[in-house]
Image (cartoon, rainbow, N blue to C red):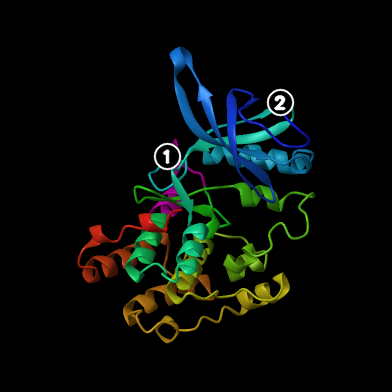
C-alpha cells in the first residue's frame, strides 16, 4: 500500500506496466516499463510521459504528435527507436527502445569523478556512431519523400552509450515541439543553449549543419575537458554561441593532434557554409583519422565508465 506521496511500482499505464521511474526532466517523466503480450510475452521499453502542463497546451500536443509520427520512421542502430505514441487519460507519452547503458553526460561525469576522462580515441568513436545515426535521420525518406528531420537538441544528455559499445541518439522532434509550447517554464532549457548553433540562437531556419555544429561542440568539450560556450547565465551563453569563438584544441590539450583539431574546428565554423557539407562528411573525416591513428580499435571499450 502506498504511504503519503510515495509512488509504488509496478503501475498500470495503458498497455504498459511502469516498473521504475528513471528520471524527471523539464518536459517529461521517464520510466522503465514493460509491455505484456500473448502467452506471457514481455518487452522492456522506456515510457516518456509528458508532464501535465505540456499536455494542456494544444500547440505543443499537435506538434508532439506530428514529430512523433515522423520520428517513428527512424530505424537505425545509432538511433533510439520509437515503438508507440499515444495518450492515456489525457497524458501523452512515447514508448521507445530500452538501451542498457547510460547517457553520455553521466558517462562524462563519471570519468571526471574518477579523474579519468575518456581517451581521444574513445571520444572520437562515440561521435562517429552518434554522427552515423544523425546523418541517417537527416537523409531519411519515406516513399521517396524526405522527412527533413533536424534534431535541434544534440547534447550529451541525448546520446545513450550502451554496455555493448553502441552510441544512440534519442529524442528526435521533442525540442521542436517544446519550442512551440506556451507552457515552457523559465529554466526548462537552461544549459541546453550551450550546444546551439549560431543560426539556431538567432532563430533562423535550420538544416542539418546546425546539428553538425552541436556535434562539434560535444567533441570539443570531450577532448578539452572544458565547456565551450557556457556562461554565468543563458544570456551570456547565447552571446558566446553567437560569437562562436573556438579555442584551438591543441592549446587546450597537448595530446590532441593538429589534424583532429582541424576537423573539429571545421564543424564549429561560425558560418554554416564553412562547415562540412553534412554530418556524413564530418563522420568520414573522423573515421579516416581514427583508423589511421588508433592501433587497436577493439581496445577502446567505455564499459568501465558506465555506472
Q: Position of residue 35 (x, y in %)?
A: 52, 25
The answer to which of 67 and 79 lies nearer the viewer is: 79
Q: Residue at x 67, y 44 (%)?
A: 28
Q: Position of residue 212 (x, y in %)?
A: 48, 63
Q: Is disc 1 surrounded by few (<14), some (14 to 19) or many (20+) residues within 10 Å?
A: some
Q: Is residue 114 above or below residue 245?
A: above
Magenta region, residue range: 132-147
Q: Position of residue 206 (x, y in %)?
A: 58, 60
Quadrant of image for the N terminus: top right
The answer to which of 167 and 143 lies nearer the viewer is: 167
Q: Is residue 88 above or below residue 270?
A: above
Name the outermost residue toward the top. 39
Q: Is residue 94 above or below residue 281?
A: above
Q: Which residue is mark 1?
A: 75
Name the outermost residue toward the bottom. 251
The image shows a total of numbered marks equal to: 2
**Tag 1, which secondary structure?**
loop
**Tag 2, which secondary structure?**
loop
Question: Which image quadrant is residue 57 in?
Answer: top right
Q: Is residue 101 above or below residue 227?
A: above
- Using residue 205 as the reference point, say whether residue 257 is left or right of it: left
The answer to which of 99 and 205 lies nearer the viewer is: 99
- Using residue 242 as the reference point, say whether residue 264 is left or right of it: left
Q: Nearer the viewer, mark 2 or mark 1?
A: 2
Q: Which residue is mark 2?
A: 1
Question: Which image quadrant is residue 118 in?
Answer: bottom left
In this rendering, does residue 280 appear at all?
A: no
Q: Is residue 133 magenta?
A: yes
N-term mark: 2 or 1 = 2
Mark 2 and mark 1: Cα distance apart in space = 41 Å
Q: Position of residue 241 (x, y in %)?
A: 61, 74
In this rendering, does residue 113 appear at all?
A: yes
Amino acid at each position: 500500500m502506498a504511504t503519503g506521496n510515495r509512488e509504488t511500482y509496478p503501475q498500470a499505464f495503458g498497455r504498459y506496466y511502469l516498473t521504475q521511474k528513471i528520471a524527471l526532466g523539464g518536459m517529461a517523466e521517464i520510466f522503465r516499463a514493460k509491455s505484456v503480450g500473448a502467452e506471457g510475452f514481455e518487452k522492456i521499453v522506456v515510457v516518456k510521459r509528458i508532464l501535465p502542463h505540456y499536455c494542456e497546451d494544444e500547440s505543443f500536443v499537435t506538434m508532439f504528435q506530428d514529430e512523433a509520427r515522423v520520428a517513428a520512421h527512424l530505424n537505425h542502430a545509432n538511433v533510439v527507436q520509437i515503438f508507440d505514441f499515444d495518450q492515456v487519460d489525457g497524458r501523452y507519452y512515447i514508448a521507445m527502445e530500452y538501451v542498457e547503458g547510460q547517457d553520455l553526460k553521466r558517462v562524462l561525469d563519471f570519468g571526471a569523478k574518477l579523474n579519468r576522462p575518456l581517451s581521444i580515441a574513445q571520444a572520437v568513436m562515440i561521435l562517429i556512431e552518434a554522427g552515423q545515426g544523425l546523418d541517417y535521420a537527416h537523409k531519411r525518406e519515406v516513399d521517396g519523400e524526405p522527412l527533413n528531420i533536424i534534431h535541434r537538441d544534440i547534447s550529451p544528455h541525448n546520446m545513450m552509450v550502451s554496455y555493448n559499445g553502441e552510441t544512440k541518439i534519442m529524442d528526435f522532434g521533442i525540442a521542436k515541439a517544446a519550442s512551440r509550447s506556451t507552457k515552457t517554464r523559465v529554466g526548462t532549457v537552461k544549459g541546453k543553449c550551450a550546444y546551439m548553433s549560431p543560426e539556431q540562437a538567432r532563430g533562423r531556419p535550420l538544416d542539418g549543419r546546425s546539428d553538425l555544429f552541436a556535434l562539434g561542440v560535444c567533441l570539443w568539450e570531450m577532448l578539452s575537458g572544458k565547456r565551450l560556450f557556457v556562461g554565468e547565465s543563458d544570456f551570456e551563453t547565447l552571446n558566446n554561441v553567437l560569437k562562436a569563438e573556438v579555442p584551438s584544441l591543441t592549446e587546450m590539450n597537448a595530446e590532441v593532434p593538429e589534424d583532429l583539431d582541424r576537423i573539429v574546428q571545421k564543424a564549429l565554423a561560425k558560418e554554416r557554409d564553412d562547415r562540412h557539407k553534412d554530418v556524413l562528411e564530418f563522420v568520414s573525416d573522423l573515421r579516416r583519422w581514427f583508423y589511421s591513428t588508433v592501433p587497436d580499435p577493439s581496445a577502446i571499450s567505455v564499459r568501465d565508465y558506465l555506472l
